[in-house]
Amino acid sequence: MWGHFYLDDDDLPEPEKQAGESQDIVEFARRQLGFEPDEKQIEVLRSRARRGILNCTRQWGKSTTAAVMAAHRAWTEEGSVVLVASPSARQSAELVEKAREMFLTMGIAAHGDGHNDISLQLPNGARIVGLPENASKFRGFSAVSLMLIDEAAQVADKTYKSLRAMLAVSAGDLWLMSTPYGKRGFFYECWANGGDEWTRFSVKATECPRIGADFLEEERREMGAAWFGQEYMAEFIDNGEAVFGRDVIERALDDDVEPLWPA
């Protein structure tokens, strides 16, 4: 059992009771968590995007970056709700666990909200809640300040649609974070066709200071160009199951041509 977590007032470091609300998120990561983000992580953390898409290589640190976002939002916004979704309850729990460890680094012992198996609650009333994949269990959350969808490329479209409804009243922030998984699903559609409402970040393995060139060359040889491009170079690759690739079909479409039959 993953367990519940709760933060007691007595556990809060005294200075942050007053200063937390105005603290810059990068300084929060450095001073409170002992985490030094790289240049791209700083760009993501400070973007203040209302709708953000992070399309990145494996092993870049997206889950840690997301956990910093979740911890900072809960720490600085009284009564806020941060939801974490992913393809499975286990993956959601991993991200919430990272946030719990961050609070422990701050000297805060954490417990759950008493209602959700995967959860953290702060004495300011803020909560971080991890969700399972089952869309039927999502209903009931409202006033969501921040929604993080981890490994979004592998989350079902129906789940995504159910999640978005929770932002209707609060006008909360939404972040999609993932390595690509083919030219399909809402993650690809939002990246390729979502319009200006989305702030997009792309991170290739060659841009990550923690991934060595020798390792990447070995992976390129072992995996082949297409798979390597998807896993490490943030490329959306056709899965090869269709007769025509997605790009060929999209180039063939012409809005000026009248259809033979009405829709």
Image: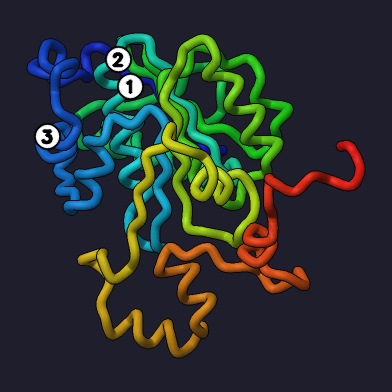
Q: In the structure shown, which secondary structural element does the residue marked by tag 3 occupy?
A: helix
Residue contact between numbered discs 1 and 2, judged by CB atoms under 8 Å: yes
User: What is the count of numbered marks?
Assistant: 3
Residue 200, x across and y down, in percent: 38, 45
Residue 242, x across and y down, in percent: 76, 69
Reply above or below: 76 against 196. above
Q: Nearer the viewer, residue 165 or 37?
A: 165
Distance of label 3 from label 1 (alpha carbons): 16 Å
Residue under label 3, please give it. Answer: 27
In the image, is 113 to the left or to the right of 29? right
Distance of label 3 from label 2 (alpha carbons): 16 Å
Q: Residue at x 49, y 82 (%)?
A: 225
Residue under label 1, please give it. Answer: 74
Residue 100, x across and y down, in percent: 35, 34
Residue contact between numbered discs 3 and 2, judged by CB atoms under 8 Å: no
Q: In the structure shown, which secondary structural element does the residue marked by tag 1 occupy?
A: helix
Residue under label 2, please give it. Answer: 77
Residue 137, x across and y down, in percent: 69, 26
